[in-house]
Image (cartoon, rainbow, N blue to C red):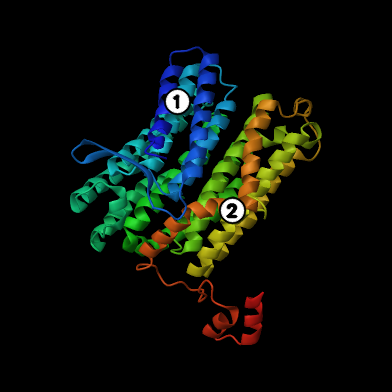
Amino acid sequence: MGGFPILSVMLLVPLLAGVACLFVEAKAARTIALAATLIDLALGVVLWLNFDIGGAQWQFTERAPIFAGFNYALGIDGIALLLIVLSVFLMPICILASQSIEKRVGEYMAAFLFMEVLMIGVFAAQDLFLFYIFFEAGLIPMYLIIGIWGGQNRIYAAYKFFLYTLLGSVLMLIAMLWMVNEAGTTDIPTLMQYDFPPAAQTWLWLAFFASFAVKMPMWPVHTWLPDAHVQAPTAGSVILAGVLLKMGGYGFIRFSLPMFPEASAQFVWLIWGLSMAAVVITSLIALVQQDMKKLIAYSSVAHMAIVTIGLFAFNVQGLEGAMIVMLSHGLVSGALFLCVGVIYDRLHTREIDRYGGLAINMPKYALFFLLFTMASIGLPGTSGFVGEFLSLAGIYQANTWATLVCATGIILGAGYMLYLYWRIAFGVQKNADAAAMPDLSLREWLMLGPIAAAVLWMGVYPESFLAPMRQDIAALDARLSRAAPEGDSHLAPGTPRAEAANAVGGTHDAGHGEAEGAH
């Protein structure tokens, strides 16, 4: 890029546009917000195209000292690249989805633009305290979006969201101060290679876990999420599910696993236990929901549990699968919330029973909704399949029982998503107002079309998304290998079938195994 500070520009564009939105009328604010998010999307594409796969781990680095012990330091690896691209991809769609907002439009658009600055900052920060500032400041615009433009119980939901996520972060700040004092640096790449004493790792890991577990959110600290989703406006739900939940997963990848590998291995039982409970419990809760948003919110908790258990499988497949599930969930859950928003704007209710038979009068809508439903279930050919298959392959190497429990979550997921789709799109049209709703407008096509294309692209050709992060995942796996707990599957990846069978006392014919390998 010839020294061009592209990451700083990506932070500056929405920041300036957000300030401008505060001083103009509603129509101009919408135009400025859409233009700024599209510019950032274009810069994100430039970032992707110029990222050197197989090159240096940290690219597009920028560094300037601010004062002693605090630096303005930006840079990305393949993992951060993908999450930044996801963020800038969803933001213009959120602006398009906000046409129903009529009060204080300028402030609303500014809140979303400031949110974009903070999301990109979280993924690009290379200084520990800079990361913390971006990570925590992201609470403020989301708190305002829920509290000002949300539903009937918006104040309760906003306070709950803010207090839950803030509480864990205080412990994380204390841990960060200790780490800087111990290691003598605030540089994240340096800290990722620093060997903290195993006794200290335990406490540091728990402090970071308190923050990231709430952000994911992991069961049982997930209860703020359904309330936040139900009360948030449509675009708020999209960005909350699409990007903000991913900050917890990113935190595990960037901090908990590489900085505290021994402690991560020590607490693997806790992660697996909570994740398995989340997969089953929240899936069963989703089955009985009557509110569309609540159902999708509970499904988010179940999907993010697959992410946490994949991350703590301590192998390449689990880590890659967790990343792909995060990207896929960002697209698919965002799209499902948009689908809810489309019909909510027409009928102003999220009650599932108020709909039915929409495939008759809204066939294009029903087709999009079906695609995203199938992607959420994990149908082959969609992004959901790739992530879940890789995650389960990784989890199986670590623990066969955990894999069994996670697989039941996929079956339950098919149950609640197909049940939701059947009640909304099929059946008898029992309500005249729902039967009279018009099909998708051009604006709604522009919202759902790009996500549908991305979901199919990731499902058909996942290598586009795996290639940029493969080197970083391998480096993380190498860092974890010294502490990785012994798996119970007795099957090493890449072992020919005959050898694997002999290793566990099987009697497969070796010649048959070689013939299989030749294919």
Position of 208 with respect to 228 (left or right) is left
The quadrant of the rendering that contains the N terminus is top left
Marking on residue 462: 2
Amino acid carrying label 1: it is: Ala
Marking on residue 111: 1
Total marks placed:
2
Between 374 and 497, the one lying in front of the other is 497
Residue 169 falls in image quadrant:
top left
Q: Compared to 146, does 312 lie above or below?
A: below
**Mark 1 vs mark 2: in front:** 2
Residue 161 falls in image quadrant:
top left
The quadrant of the rendering that contains the C terminus is bottom right
Position of 505 with respect to 137 (left or right) is right
What percent of the width, then of the height, locates residue 67?
20, 35
Viewer can see residue 220: no
Q: Secondary structure at mark 1?
A: helix
Position of 19 with respect to 305 (left or right) is left
**Structural crowding at the residue carrying mark 2, measured as other residues with C-alpha within 10 Å and reported as few (<14), some (14–19) or many (≥20):** some
Please identify the residue farthest to the front as the structure is shown. Answer: 2
Q: Compared to 34, does 316 lie above or below?
A: below
Cα–Cα span, label 1 and label 2: 33 Å
Q: Verify CB contact (< 8 Å) between mark 1 and mark 2.
A: no
Residue in view at x 49 percent, y 52 percent: 468
Q: Secondary structure at mark 2?
A: loop
Residue in view at x 67 percent, y 53 percent: 379
Residue in view at x 51 percent, y 64 percent: 395
Residue in view at x 53 percent, y 67 percent: 396
What percent of the width, then of the height, locates residue 25?
50, 12
Amino acid carrying label 2: it is: Pro
**Structural crowding at the residue carrying mark 1, measured as other residues with C-alpha within 10 Å and reported as few (<14), some (14–19) or many (≥20):** many
What percent of the width, then of the height, locates residue 351?
66, 33
Marking on residue 245: none
